[in-house]
Image: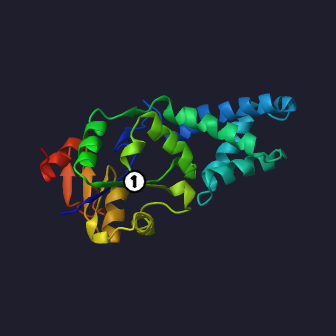
Amino acid sequence: MKNFFCFDLGETLINFNKPNKKWHSSLIGEVLPDMFNTLRKYYQSFKDICTVKEFSNIGYKIISESHKLSMIKRLSLILDYYKIPTEDDLINLLLNDFYHNLISDAFLYPETIKVLEKLNEKGFVLGLWSNTPWQSPGFLIERIMEHFKIRKYFSIVLFSGDHGIRKPDPITFDLVLKKGQLDKSQMIYIGNSEVDIKTGSSFGIPTIWVNREHKKLSKYCPTPEFIINDLEGLFDLIPIN
């Protein structure tokens, strides 16, 4: 029996979906305007350089087109564009704007803690690989996990923004195993998306698809080994008293 359960985070353990809102519209309509206001406070003269609309459009273009770069590097490019020195304190303030927007509508699925707690109690090893929005640094996402009191259940936690690669690249799971000093034969991956299923299939491990919305898979997606309606469905696969 598999004893290493590796999870996806967003829409698997925590719901980050914004009501009636897409991520790109949130970035250009909320995150970047907040960053603009932060820059105005940090540099009084910044308000004379551009309007919030201009800043948001330029910032969005830089962030959305820099696919392989970390969020920190993307923010540095925005500062470079406006000839603003890249200082760690300023970058952290801008990241904080992103964090507050990311967590503002997030909520924990009601069964998440119950399931993690039970798996932990029964001696299963719990890990996590999560792609982060725009390759944002892992410490922001760990802050969110701490906020929702779930970080303590995981012995292995890795994020795409810290490693420069993303699912569905199967190397992501190789990194997880190396960090945990675990064998591939012990691992099963639990996620909510086709990307999660494709990554597990490419890596040669079984996947559990959490299909809360009863979606149908595209014809290009491998068939997951197991499908559950929510995380408590894990208990039907591995009966736990």
Give the position of the C terminus as an image quadrant.
Answer: top left
**Against 132, is 96 above or below?**
above
Front residue of 238 and 103: 238
Q: Quadrant of residue 17?
A: top left
Q: Quadrant of residue 32?
A: top right
**Residue beneath label 1, please?**
155
* Res 229 seen here: yes
- The picture places residue 6, in percent across and down from the top left corner, at 33, 56
Which amino acid is tagged 1?
Ser
- The picture places residue 35, in percent across and down from the top left corner, at 69, 35
Position of 170 with respect to 132 (left or right) is left
Q: Residue at x 74, y 46 (%)?
A: 88
Q: Residue at x 46, y 29 (%)?
A: 105
Callout 1 crowding tier (Cα within 10 Å): few <14, some 14–19, many ≥20:
few
- The picture places residue 212, in percent across and down from the top left corner, at 26, 41
Give the position of the N terminus as an image quadrant.
Answer: bottom left
Front residue of 14 and 219: 14
Position of 203 with respect to 18 (left or right) is left
Front residue of 179 and 228: 179
Position of 182 with respect to 62 (left or right) is left
Front residue of 119 and 74: 119
- The picture places residue 93, in percent across and down from the top left corner, at 69, 37
Position of 20 with respect to 45 (left or right) is left
Q: Residue at x 22, y 49 (%)?
A: 122
SS for callout 1: loop
Q: How many marks on residues?
A: 1
